[in-house]
Image (cartoon, coloured by chain):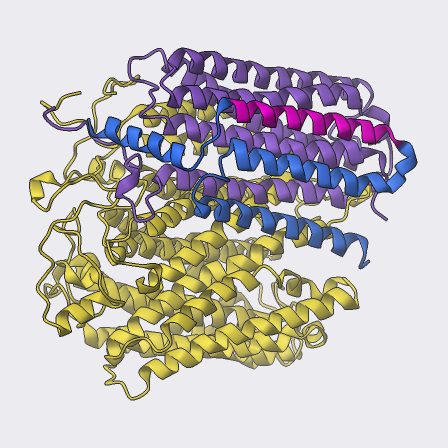
Amino acid sequence: MAQRAQAAQHAAAEVHTGHPTPKTYFIVAMILSAITAVEVAIFYATWLGYGIIPVLAVLSTVKFAMVAMFYMHLRYDNRLFSSLFVGGLALAFSVVFALIGLFRFFV
Amino acid sequence: MAQAPAVPHGDAADETTTGLSHRKLLMWAFLGSDCMFFGSLIATYLVYKGKSISGPLPEDVFSIPVTSVSTFVLLMSSMSMVMAYSALTRGNIKGFRIWIMSTAIMGMTFLAFQTFEFRDFVQEGLTPRTNLFGTTFFTLTGFHGAHVTLGVIWLLSLFFYSFKRGGVTAERSLDVDLAALYWHFVDIVWIVIFTVVYLFGVFEGFN
Amino acid sequence: MTTIAFSIPRPTYPTGVWSWITTIDHKRIGILYGVTAFIMFVVGGIEALIMRVQLSSSELDIVSPEVFNQLFTMHGTTMIFLAIMPMGAAFFNFIIPLQIGARDVAFPRLNAFSYWTFLAGAIMLNFSWFLGGAPNAGWFGYAPLTGEAQNLGHGIDFWIISLQLLGIASLAAAFNFIVTILNMRAPGMTLMRMPLFTWMTLVTSFLLILAFPVITVALIELLFDRAFGTNFFVPAAGADPILWQHLFWVFGHPEVYILILPAMGIVSEILPTFSKKPLFGYPVIVLSGIIIGFMGWMVWSHHMFTVGLGPVPNAVFTLTTMAIAIPTGVKIFNWLATTWRGSIDLSTPMLFALGFIAMFTIGGISGIMHAQAASDAQQQDTYFIVAHIHYVLFGGSIFALIAGIYYWFPKFTGRMFNEKIGKIGFWLTFIGFNMTFFPMHFTGLDGMPRRIYTYADGMGWDMWSAVSTVGAFILAFSILVFLYNVVTSWIKGEPAEADPWDARTLEWSIPSPPPEYNFAEIPTVHDRDDWWSQKRRKVERPGAPVPVAGGSGYGGVEHAIHLPQPSYWPIVVSIGLLIAGYGLIYNVAVIAIGAGIGMIAVYAWSFEPVNEPEEGSAH
């Protein structure tokens, strides 16, 4: 069966590129949970004031990147997929920041 | 083997120019596009942050512990989704069924949390009509919830389809891969919403 | 994998109405798009003529101010979303698979769905005339003009829902063409060997998938304001209606390039063919197209210079807008250089393409004038702007689209058009167009505002307005001449050869009209302008059959070409969406019916294989 052979090929390719194992997925999940716990803890650290904004922004960016890289396989997959996604993402961020700038700083 | 079964359009990855499957390329382009969708909703929320002329405001209604739990549930559903895919590619259909069902259940748990949260807010006097915060909050999180709902329907469809002989197989794992990509995307959107809307919620605005 | 949850037999209509309803052949869908878009173009044109009659002299009372508001709103919306965009889509559909050497698009059923959803949007918008009045807040529907309290009746609701339907259609089509172009090119066709029209379609598709979500969100917010009493654009609740303008133009400016880039692609195909020279500076033209697409995101607030954003944003957007003139100018000079010392054949397509360059340049120059925020303060909302947009959208897009229709007419229909009538038509269009829109520069600089249903005697606008109206009728007559040429040639024109223009790209290597399977053998590409070099080098047609990219046939023998089969489901999903759309306006229960129909059809579609397995095959 052509398809089965193809699937076997895929599986072989996955080994080559070091496709993650369930163990990797589990470790990632633990890290994600830990970061979330830290985020919530920081939220209650009121003495940080506005300082929590950059800290939380960095932490959730890490979470975002980990899910995209490991669970969505962008780390192991073709770079075209990353480009399509990151292109849309970067544009969305730019639009959000441009609008915030236009409404908050140039009024 | 008289002839290979008609290869479903887009599954024959090695026949395409880039060597990538049509459907996966479509899915990633769609996710890039959906970034703009949520980006616009988040922009609206942030532009109007702190501009409501009457309450209730985020600090009056948000319960960070409760939302942290539902956030955790959604994060874990992403792990179980990737486990389902991983089980399927190893030909473990039983494992696939268990993991995908638990993903769907966690998705529904998240939705239940959201429903109760919405009901709570309404009881505290916050509806989409009350003020700008209500309008932008319910629209943003509501559309995220709609994405989750669609995802749950998709996951359940795959679960039930897996009982059909040859419905969900390792050779056709792309079907599950696509659903998984969508599901993880919904999860990362929530990562952003949780931080920007909930954890930043205590601040009146950025100026 | 054969049994289907909904075992309705697969449609197999070779001819007749049902064959068109169930078709998933990209060529037929292209023709459906083209014909529908042309009908909409005529409808939008009639709306324009009524406005021109009303404005032909001061203080006329042919239509009421209320109807006039509906006319300019419908004219703008129709021409942009229902005429120019789908005409572009018609070319994408028909030409792209042929230019890249494929047998169909990547998702043939999704392609059919795009067309039917587009048609649903067209129906939704145009039937508003008979259901209590058309939308009346301009094609950009500025808040709070569109608010529930300010705008009674359902006109705006029809506008919102139809734009959402058209958005779904455009998004589906754009995803489809991105995948098709990236993934279904014939062997050897690298990105830098792709024809320019294919390149511009790729850029346009990326603009579509990134721009449409923004307008989708803006329209959802407006719909919620009207339907559920939310506060997105309600100033009394502290909202800022300027947000609508921002969201609209974040979408709206890329949209402008969505309208013009396919036109630039068409012209870039025609000029080399009729100059008998390769396109001058191919890589630079490709790059300019990409840069235009990219910079289209950085200029949106130039539509809002008079809003009062402050000196910093106005200065920034002035600079970015002026910078866009650079890649555009690069393209224009490359086109001119393409014709330089070529052996130019002034056939009808070439006339329109040259007309495009001239008219688009005029529009570009007037654009640079109001790219300057200070200068724009004088021109904003006057007929000067009307002149500008018509020079770029009619003199630009429509001239190029007509050029494209003439150029590919032999390929579309297998017949030649009447060259003589074509040339007469060109000169009528050229004269009528300039007579209509050039005087608007004068009335605009004299201060005549747009979107007014009449003006006072003695403003000094009468004479040029009358000239514009006469020009508009010449222009309309020229479109009738074009229509006559197309219809009569389609019925009884001379049969066309495969390659009547001695052209350069792959679509001319196959018969006119192309057989259902397009290419008996998938070509192997060795060159940019591959067909041209094949002819010049007298290379034999590549012999070895090649597996079809994303298609289903193996080998070059015709019986082995498996084309995707027709399907009922795309149109059923679109009907579901249309019903749900009317439900949003009239009755919640109807939404459930529409959504139910759509959902069932989506499932049936998902479980339906692209090709039914052949009888006797093992599975």
How many labels sit on residues? 0
The chain painted blue is A
Indicate left or right for B54 with B118 as reference.
Answer: right
Residue C369 image position (x, y, % from top left): 62, 78
What residue is at 66 percent from the left and 38 percent from the top? A62
Residue in the image at 22% along x and 37% along y:
C564
Left or right of C148? Residue C14 is left
Find out whether residue C603 is within the magenta segment: no
The range drawn in magenta is A23-45
The yellow-tinted chain is C
Q: Position of residue A74 (x, y in %)?
A: 50, 39
Res C44 → quadrant? bottom left
Magenta residues, dominant SS class: helix
Q: Which chain is purple?
A: B
Q: Is residue A27 magenta?
A: yes
Closer to the camera, B76 or C511? B76
Q: Is residue C499 above or below residue C519?
A: below
> Split into 4 quadrants, where in the image is the C terminus of chain C?
top left
Can the viewer see residue A7 in this picture? Answer: yes
